[in-house]
Image (cartoon, coloured by chain):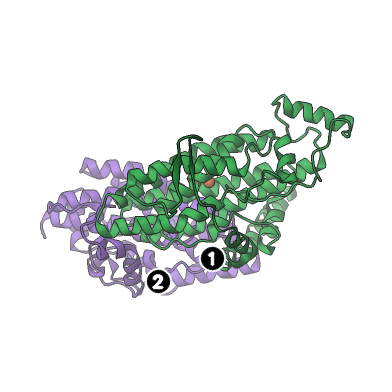
């Protein structure tokens, strides 16, 4: 998912007795599945946690342009190039909806950007992995968009109105991306020996990072419990990861590819796959900035922002000149 | 040169212009000054690649040797490419990209407008679809040229430098050779020279509003239409064609 390990500000969930009247009314509305709108009263912790979560999600969308953008100029057919361009354009659009949703909580896009650039805010760990062969573009659509959907479909029901509506729009496009990604995987897995090799190589590298997207187990986390009570988080990380594995393994089998996990096996009794957890020490290193592409990804965004300063200033200056002219007339 | 040979040549020129410019614009993905521009540039590139599929698809049909749009895009070498030099020029800063786009869009929208009257209905249909997109591209690039030209001192200086750099490449858009004359005679396409006056007017109007000075230098750079390119095209093709070349016969 695109927002990992978002910390809520609360220490834990307050009991009804500990809540103020306002807090109690708020919680009742959330419990009754009413949508909270920007002008409504909300606990400060709710607002802050949402800003972190939506902001991180937005950053993930725009940083997510980079690993895929890496292959646009090398896409092997005109149609693949067009599909990839459209997808990357969609991701930028998702970023835009989400920044707008965050703005309704009283934080500007520029403020969020600055926090991304300074490293105060994160984006999903997955985008710190490189895209090394063309099948990676298939694997990203299939696995990364697939994992994002697992998380975002339930979030369509989140308590915050603007976030929920952004998710509804985004989910439609994400499922399209996942199908297109899987379509690339089929072409590769059923293609020449070289293409099969690319497909397996992509799965080998993206499998565990995809599982990491859901974040470490949070069944005992106070932050998650609070977020779930507020309905800005709907499922635990483990539930979503299990669902993802259950859905993805048969898809890999259909492709004739091997999931890189010797312990993977179907459990008749539970009705779920058993699988190896990703290496969480690697995850924490990536989060800290030590993943394979952290420097390149953040560096590219900072460079774009700094190189573009004269453009933003120029546009602003022109708008001011125009406004002054209108005022003088 | 037969009519169909000239027609094929003309279609390659249209398709190669959009292919190479689309490639250049797509290099911006994720790197532009504001999020809205990431979206707009990706959209422009997408339109241009879509137009490429149509022009090169028709080119393959007219040639009659069974080559698809992909074959033409991915399996020709640089000397067989027919795009003008302007579109293969490197992106430079955002101002250079937008100025290149504006100078091209102004020509493109005029050309497509005239092609809607082509004696070949397939050409007219492609032009009708593409001209809507080109009109939008022109509206956007002209608007940005004005706002950045008449923005801060720095943005003005950068846009003027971009204009000075690109200007000597624009003359090629209006050169006519034997192929152009043949397609014009057949009523397939206008003679490029006939677009120059309107282009001058349009460009002058926008550049004046942008407070930019029109360069006086000659149109010295040309050759792309005949297959003599700058050093840049080889690198574009090396990137673009690599997978198709390295794994011949694979389907993607
Ligand atoms: Fe997205
Ligand atoms: Fe997506």
**B181 vs B229, nearest the viewer:** B229
Residue count near mark 1 (Cα–Cα under 10 Å), binned few <14, some 14–19, many ≥20: some
Query: Is residue A3 shown left or right of residue A136?
Result: right
Is residue A117 among the parts visible in the rendering?
Answer: yes
Q: Position of residue A212 (x, y in %)?
A: 56, 53
Q: Which quarter of the figure has residue A32?
A: top right
Do the residues bearing badges 1 and 2 touch, measured as CB atoms within 8 Å? no
Q: Is the CB of the residue bearing disc 1 within 8 angstroms of ligand 2?
A: no
Is residue B43 among the parts visible in the rendering?
Answer: no
Query: Is residue B82 shown left or right of residue B182?
Result: right
Residue farthest along the left direction in this orientation: B2
Residue count near mark 2 (Cα–Cα under 10 Å), binned few <14, some 14–19, many ≥20: some
**A137 vs A194, nearest the viewer:** A194
Question: Which is in the foreground here, disc 1 or disc 2?
Answer: 1
Q: Position of residue B76 (x, y in %)?
A: 23, 64
Residue at 14% from the left image edge and 57% from the top image edge: B5
Tell which chain the image draws in purple: B
* As drawn, B59 above or below A301: above
Residue at 30% from the left image edge and 62% from the top image edge: B243
Mark 1 falls within which chain? A
Q: Is the CB of the residue bearing disc 2 within 8 angstroms of ligand 2?
A: no
**What is the distance, in whole Å, between disc 1 and disc 2 at their CAs?**
40 Å
Describe the element under mark 2 as helix, strand or loop.
helix
What residue is shown with label 2?
B168
Number of the label disc, if any, that sits on residue A293:
1
Mark 2 falls within which chain? B
Residue farthest along the top direction in this orientation: A32
Residue at 24% from the left image edge and 69% from the top image edge: B227
Residue farthest along the front direction in this orientation: A269
Number of the label disc, if any, that sits on residue A231:
none
Tell which chain the image draws in green: A
**A141 vs B226, nearest the viewer:** A141
């Amino acid at each position: 998912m695109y927002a990992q390990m978002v910390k809520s500000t609360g220490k834990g969930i307050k009991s009804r007795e500990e809540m103020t009247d306002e807090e109690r009314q708020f919680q009742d509305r959330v419990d009754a599945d009413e949508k909270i709108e920007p002008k409504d009263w909300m606990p400060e912790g709710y607002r802050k946690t949402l800003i972190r979560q939506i902001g991180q999600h937005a950053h993930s969308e725009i940083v997510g342009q980079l690993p895929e953008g890496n292959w646009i100029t090398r896409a092997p057919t005109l149609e693949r190039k067009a599909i990839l361009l459209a997808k990357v354009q969609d991701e930028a659009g998702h970023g835009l909806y989400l920044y707008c949703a965050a703005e309704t909580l009283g934080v500007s896009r520029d403020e969020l950007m600055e926090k991304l650039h300074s490293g105060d805010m994160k984006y999903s760990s997955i985008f710190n992995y490189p895209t090394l062969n063309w099948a990676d573009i298939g694997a990203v659509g299939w696995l990364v968009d697939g994992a994002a959907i697992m998380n975002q479909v339930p979030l369509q029901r989140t308590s915050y109105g603007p976030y929920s509506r952004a998710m509804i729009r985004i989910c439609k496009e994400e499922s399209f991306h996942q199908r297109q990604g899987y379509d690339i995987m089929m072409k590769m897995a059923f293609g020449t020996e070289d293409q099969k090799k690319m497909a397996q190589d992509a799965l080998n590298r993206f499998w565990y990072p995809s599982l990491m997207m859901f974040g470490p187990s949070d069944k005992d986390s106070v932050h998650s419990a609070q977020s779930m009570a507020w309905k800005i988080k709907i499922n635990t990380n483990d539930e979503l990861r299990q669902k993802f594995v259950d859905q993805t393994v048969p898809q890999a089998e259909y492709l004739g590819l091997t999931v890189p996990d010797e312990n993977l096996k179907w459990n008749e009794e539970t009705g779920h796959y058993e699988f190896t957890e990703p290496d969480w020490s690697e995850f924490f290193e990536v989060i800290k900035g030590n993943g394979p592409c952290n420097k390149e990804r953040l560096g590219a965004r900072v460079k774009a922002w700094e190189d573009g300063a004269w453009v933003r200033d120029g546009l602003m200056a022109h708008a001011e000149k125009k406004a002054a002219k209108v005022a003088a007339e | 040169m037969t009519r169909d040979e000239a027609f094929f040549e003309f279609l390659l020129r249209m398709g190669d212009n959009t292919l190479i410019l689309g490639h250049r614009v797509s290099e911006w993905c994720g790197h532009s000054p504001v999020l809205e521009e990431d979206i707009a540039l990706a959209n422009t590139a997408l339109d241009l690649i879509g137009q490429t599929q149509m022009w090169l698809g028709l080119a393959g049909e007219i040639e009659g040797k069974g080559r698809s749009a992909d074959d033409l895009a991915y399996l020709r070498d640089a000397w067989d490419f027919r795009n003008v030099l302007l579109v293969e020029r490197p992106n430079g800063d955002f101002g250079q990209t937008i100025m290149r786009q504006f100078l091209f869009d102004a020509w493109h929208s005029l050309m497509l407008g005239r092609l809607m009257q082509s004696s070949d209905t397939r050409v007219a249909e492609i032009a009708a679809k593409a001209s809507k997109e080109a009109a939008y591209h022109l509206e956007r690039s002209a608007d940005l040229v004005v706002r950045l030209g008449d923005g801060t001192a720095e943005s003005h200086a950068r846009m003027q430098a971009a204009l000075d750099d690109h200007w000597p490449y624009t003359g090629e858009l209006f050169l006519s050779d034997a192929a152009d004359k043949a397609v014009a005679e057949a009523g397939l396409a206008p003679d490029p020279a006939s677009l120059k006056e309107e282009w001058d007017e349009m460009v002058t109007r926008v550049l004046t509003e942008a407070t930019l000075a029109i360069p006086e230098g000659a149109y010295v750079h040309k050759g792309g239409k005949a297959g003599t390119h700058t050093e840049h095209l080889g690198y574009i093709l090396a990137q673009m064609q690599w997978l198709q070349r390295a794994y011949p016969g694979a389907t993607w």
